Amino acid sequence: MKNVLHLYSNHKWTGPADHALNLVSWLQSQKALKASFACARRKNSQNHLYAKAVQRGLAFVPGLFLNKHLNWTTLPDIRALRKIVARNRIDLIHSHQDNDTLTAVLAGFGRRTVTTCYDGEPSPLNLRRRFFFRRTARILTVSAKMQAYLAKIFPDKWIEQIDIPVDPDRFYPHAKNEKILAQFGLTAQVPVAGIVARVQKHRNFELLLNALEQVVKQIPEFKLLIVGRGTHIDTVARRPVKQRGLEKNVIFTGYRRDDYREVVNLFDYKIFLQPGSDGSCRAVREALACGKPVIATRRGILPELIRDGQTGMLIGQRPSDLAQAMVTMTREKDFRLNCGRAARQFAQTVLNPERFIAKIVDCYATM
């Protein structure tokens, strides 16, 4: 039985943290593997990631700082990781962030380390990334573009693209929840689109609102749900919505925890314009699993996730491009429903957890 330790150098519930926890949860059910998890823990602060790991019943390994950034804590982590590997008889390390990959390599475990790169598109590698990518045994990328990019830099390296799955027990299509519809002052007949994103300046909300102004001229009853929060939500979204006179068309739902899936299932379709800290675009994958077509730009991994005209629509960067796509998706019901069914099918086949786990287990077996 191979014993695999997963490392995640952060304590916040951001980026691909959910992907890492899902993987450890699924691996714990494999008879030929033993999986454990380690992440940052902070005193006198909220430890969202650690709390999630405990909530899911993961085998947690304490004793590491696992700071997101390279600093003095990396040195004690190197020593601590060596002791943890020896004490717990760890065979393999699977790292999920830059600093935990660096720590594993500096501790001397590069030849038994798998690292997952969650970047959606290539960008120049800094010295740290060049150093640890060159020294890890296996690199898994969520993006085919990133795989090709790294293969050119490291032609002799084992690099494989994987499709991050969606938990089918958590995300699936179902009827719009009447209680939540009433909470937002909606009915099942009102056309609704939604965007799930941290409301930040770089997430292209200006493009969205510019397009929305054009849409409501043609479809006055149209509603847009903005699901999320952010320190700049007032300047990026709330005030611009008011200034443009779009208060009747935009609903700010805030951050949703317990009823997030139900809120996503209120959407007739989803909009996604700019990937954030998770280059794999988890929110898009969840929408597809719920049978929701996605209108997206061609940024990052989005062209790999959205099949234009089949599971959604890929658009340019002009407000008119987005507005036209929104009007089409709203008015052409048959097209929208067909895209929704294809989106669900894509999630069940390509974003299938069993397919994903098989790839991961095969990767471990080659080491």
Image (spheres, rainbow, N blue to C red):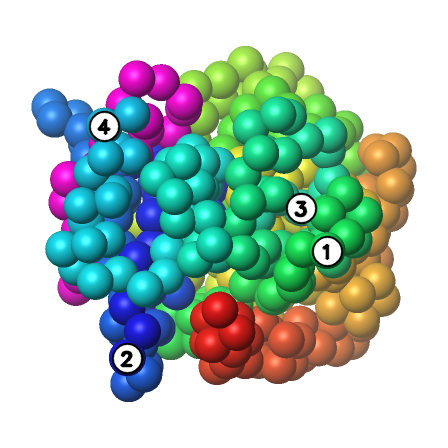
The earlier-in-sequence mark between 2 and 3 is 2
The earlier-in-sequence mark between 4 and 2 is 2
Q: Which mark is residue 156?
A: 1
**Badge 1: few (under 14), some or many (20 or more) residues near its Cα, within 10 Å?**
few
Residue 44 in percent (x, y) is at 11, 23
Q: Are dots 2 and 3 in contact, CB under 8 Å?
A: no
Q: Amino acid at mark 2?
A: Met
CA distance for labels 1 and 2: 29 Å
Quarter holding residue 46: top left
SS of the residue under disc 2:
loop
Tell me, yes or no, whether the highlighted magenta stretch contains residue 64: yes
The reply to whether residue 19 is in sight is no
Q: Amino acid at mark 4?
A: Pro
> On the image, numbered disc 3 is attached to which residue?
120
- The reply, left or right, for residue 83 in relation to residue 340 is left
CA distance for labels 4 and 3: 32 Å
Q: Are dots 4 and 3 in contact, CB under 8 Å?
A: no
Q: Are dots 1 and 3 in contact, CB under 8 Å?
A: no
Q: Residue at x 78, y 35 (%)?
A: 211
Region in magenta: 56-74
> On the image, numbered disc 4 is attached to which residue?
76
